Image: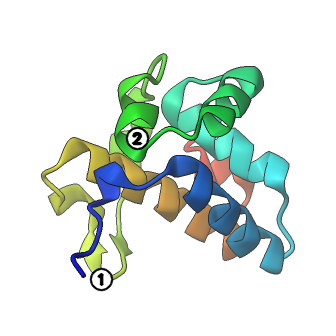
Amino acid sequence: MARKSIVEMSFSQVYPLLVQKAERKGRTRAEVDAACCWLTGYDEAGLARQLERGVTYQEFFDEAPAMNPNRVLITGKVCGVDVAAIEDPVERCARYLDKLVDELARGKALEKVLRS
């Protein structure tokens, strides 16, 4: 069976996994939400609406109110892949979000994770 492209994956199915990753390391869902909102420009209600709608990653990022221009400051590797080297914009944004959650899970302060 062919593997689903990240752009076709349901954001609402992956989101709980991101929250679990953070919570296993003592972080909160609110911090994951803050990272999601910082990256995409959604507010809490907008994020909740997208989760309820069951949108794909493609739709989640395409409909984002304002992608944060500082997202390019997110560097490093996720699953062995350099995030800056990813050509597909949706996959790159998904990896940015994953990298933010990884940094939270590693104990980095939220202010540092959000590049403030």
Q: Secondary structure at mark 2?
A: helix
Q: Position of residue 23 (x, y in %)?
A: 82, 70
Left or right for 30, reference 98: right
Mark 1 / mark 2, whichever is N-terminal: 2
| Mark 2 Cα-neighbour bin, 10 Å: few <14, some 14–19, many ≥20 | some
Give the amino acid type for the residue marked by disc 2 in the picture.
Arg
In the rendered image, which residue does mark 2 sit on?
A: 71
Q: Quadrant of the N terminus?
A: bottom left
Q: Secondary structure at mark 1?
A: loop
Q: Position of residue 115 (x, y in %)?
A: 55, 44
Q: Is residue 87 visible?
A: yes
Foreground of the two, 88 or 38: 88
What is the CA distance from the residue labelled 1 to the residue labelled 2? 19 Å
In the rendered image, which residue does mark 1 sit on?
A: 80
Q: Position of residue 74 (x, y in %)?
A: 40, 53
Residue 98, disc: none
Counting the numbered discs, the total is: 2
Q: Residue at x 36, y 47 (%)?
A: 93
Q: Quadrant of residue 3?
A: bottom left
Task: In the rendered view, tell whether residue 54 sits above or below residue 98.
Answer: above
Tell me whether the residue at label 1 lies in contact with that at label 2, contact meaning CB atoms closer than 8 angstroms: no
Q: Residue at x 39, y 59 (%)?
A: 95
Foreground of the two, 5 or 90: 5
